[in-house]
């Protein structure tokens, strides 16, 4: 069974034991593998009442909740068809919600909170009763009227100004940030926002978060105060705790909404439409949009080299210094696509007998475009490493022959010339499942650098067909001084999604 590398939910990723969620809903499309995932909540250890989610994604860990140690009362997963009760979730068909009289029977307050609608979502909040009434008397209020006011306030909180951290804030207009990079308010726990932020029914839209150094991604990073009557519309990319409105909530969220597009990638991800991790209270709020996640491998360099890689002379790795201790070989050019990375891993000193053990990061599921030849890898060579790394993407001879036919014999530098291919096929011990063809290879990636994409060879682009195939990411270390190739290389199986 595949190891889960993250938690994902259409509304929230994690509801902690102290977390409470009431009268909320989501209509969020989820996609990703190796996640504990539920349509509404990924992992519920707290309490959820009178909430529901609409079926937008198949093959979740659970329907309403991915895992459940906590309690869910009057909570529903609305599917297209089949009305049935399961041990984990109460599944109802969308036909049930299309009948107005059924909504009240399900436990929803149709007098003060919810209303019936002909179109989806069939249950929604009553507009005239949705907003939280906020009365502020005799207190100084920070009025935010435009983008400049908002940016100044956020910068002040993140700089540690205690007056701003504990302020009462009122939004006076909807604000369009026009695609600007947003640094979450209170992205460090020490500067968590602890005041009151009243959105006043307005929306903050068109902001983007993709800073790799910020691991609490949302309009708010850490929230210990209250936010109400606020909607956000945004795009977020990267790793960490990701929620459109709040990354980590230890306060109160009420009458808020999020329309978001989230593309998460990394390790130990917590990804939710509205909030990532809830350890406070959330009520009368919603989330909609699209949430995708890609778990990344951490691969130790000191893993044993695969027998399949060493099966034929073309892939055998020779020892260092075959021409003498001071030999210097022709270097492999640095990959022009590498960029400086902020991700670091400590050397593994616990691995007995391992002379050199480090962790590398890359995606487990790779999307490759046959039109552009670009294959998303998101590889990171940590700064603590002392080798340049070449990244190769390989497929088995069996798959290559099936997909390319005779073209496999014409792949030149990325595969084998015709004579070598014929010689291999005539050998008694030749196994097409163990032989490999390299369809993409990088230049060297230096320590402390990252590589987002590999470029496939022209023959691979032309002759491969769209579909999903099994592949292998092979990491080949080179000494940066002598350019020697290391004795040990590492590999990991991946899934390659070939897209026209």
Image: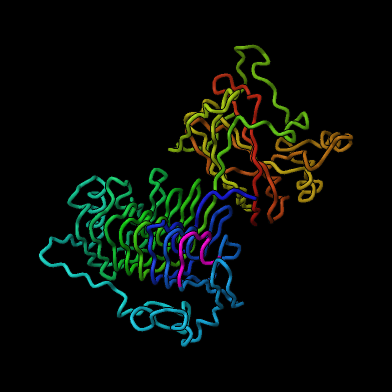
The image position of residue 201, as x and y in percent, is 28, 71
What is the tally of numbered marks visible in this picture?
0
Q: Quadrant of the C terminus?
A: bottom right
Q: Look at the picture and state if 195 lies above or below 433.
A: below
* Magenta-drawn stretch contains 159: no
Please tell me in which quadrant of the rendered image residue 272 appears.
bottom left
* Magenta-drawn stretch contains 65: yes
**One can see residue 60 in this view:** yes
Residue farthest along the left direction in this orientation: 138
The image position of residue 19, as x and y in percent, is 38, 60
Left or right relative to 408: residue 125: left
Please tell me in which quadrant of the rendered image residue 197 appears.
bottom left
The image position of residue 328, as x and y in percent, is 60, 17
**One can see residue 243 in this view:** no
Q: Nearer the viewer, residue 299 or 202?
A: 299
Left or right relative to 113: residue 92: right
Please name the residue shown 59% across and 48% down the image.
Answer: 3
Q: Nearer the viewer, residue 438 or 317?
A: 317
Left or right relative to 218: residue 239: right
Q: Look at the picture and state if 137 lies above or below 359.
A: below
- The span picked out in magenta is 63-73
Identify the colour scheme used.
Answer: rainbow
Please name the residue shown 56% across and 50% down the image.
Answer: 4
Please name the residue shown 79% across and 50% down the image.
Answer: 402
Q: Main secondary structure of the magenta part?
A: strand
The image position of residue 18, as x and y in percent, is 37, 58
């Amino acid at each position: 069974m595949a190891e889960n590398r993250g938690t994902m939910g259409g509304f929230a990723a994690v509801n902690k034991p102290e977390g409470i969620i009431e009268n909320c809903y989501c209509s969020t499309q989820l996609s990703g593998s190796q996640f504990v995932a539920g349509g509404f909540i990924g992992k519920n250890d707290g309490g959820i009442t009178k909430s529901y989610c609409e079926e937008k994604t198949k093959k979740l860990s659970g329907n309403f909740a991915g895992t459940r140690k906590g309690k869910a009362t009057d909570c529903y997963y609305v599917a297209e068809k089949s009305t049935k009760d399961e041990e984990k979730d109460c599944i109802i068909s969308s036909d049930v919600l299309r009948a107005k009289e059924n909504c009240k029977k399900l436990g929803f307050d149709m007098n003060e909170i919810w209303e019936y609608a002909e179109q989806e979502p069939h249950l929604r909040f009553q507009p005239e009763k949705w907003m939280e009434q906020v009365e502020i008397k005799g207190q100084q209020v920070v009025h935010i009227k435009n983008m400049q006011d908002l940016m100044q306030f956020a910068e002040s909180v993140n700089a540690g100004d205690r007056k701003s951290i504990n302020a009462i804030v009122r939004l006076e207009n909807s604000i369009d940030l026009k695609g600007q990079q947003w640094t979450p308010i209170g992205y460090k726990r020490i500067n968590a926002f602890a005041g009151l932020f009243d959105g006043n029914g307005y929306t903050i839209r068109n902001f983007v978060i993709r800073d790799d150094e910020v691991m609490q991604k949302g309009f708010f990073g850490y929230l210990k105060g209250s936010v109400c009557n606020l909607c956000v519309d945004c795009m977020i990319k990267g790793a960490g705790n990701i929620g459109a409105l709040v990354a980590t909530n230890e306060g109160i969220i009420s009458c808020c909404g999020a329309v978001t597009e989230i593309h998460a990638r990394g390790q130990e991800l917590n990804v939710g439409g509205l909030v990532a991790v809830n350890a406070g209270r959330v009520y009368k709020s919603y989330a909609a949009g699209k949430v995708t996640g890609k778990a990344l491998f951490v691969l130790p360099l000191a893993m044993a080299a695969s027998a399949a890689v060493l099966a034929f002379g073309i892939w055998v790795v020779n020892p260092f210094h075959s021409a003498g201790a001071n030999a210097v070989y022709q270097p492999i050019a640095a990959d022009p696509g590498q960029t400086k990375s902020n991700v670091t891993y400590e050397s593994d000193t616990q691995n007995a007998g391992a002379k050199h053990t480090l962790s590398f990061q890359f995606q487990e599921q790779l999307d490759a475009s046959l039109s552009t030849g670009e294959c998303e890898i998101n590889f990171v060579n940590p700064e603590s490493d002392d080798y340049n790394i070449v990244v190769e993407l390989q497929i088995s001879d069996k798959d290559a022959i099936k997909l390319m036919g005779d073209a496999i014999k014409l792949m030149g530098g990325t595969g084998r010339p015709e004579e070598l291919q014929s010689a291999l096929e005539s050998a008694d011990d030749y196994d097409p499942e163990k032989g490999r063809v390299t369809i993409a290879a990088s230049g060297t990636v230096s320590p402390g650098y990252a590589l987002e994409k590999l470029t496939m060879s022209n023959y691979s682009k032309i002759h491969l067909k769209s579909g999903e195939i099994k592949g292998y990411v092979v990491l080949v270390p080179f000494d940066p001084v002598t350019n020697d190739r290391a004795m040990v290389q590492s590999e990991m199986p991946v899934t390659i999604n070939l897209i026209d």
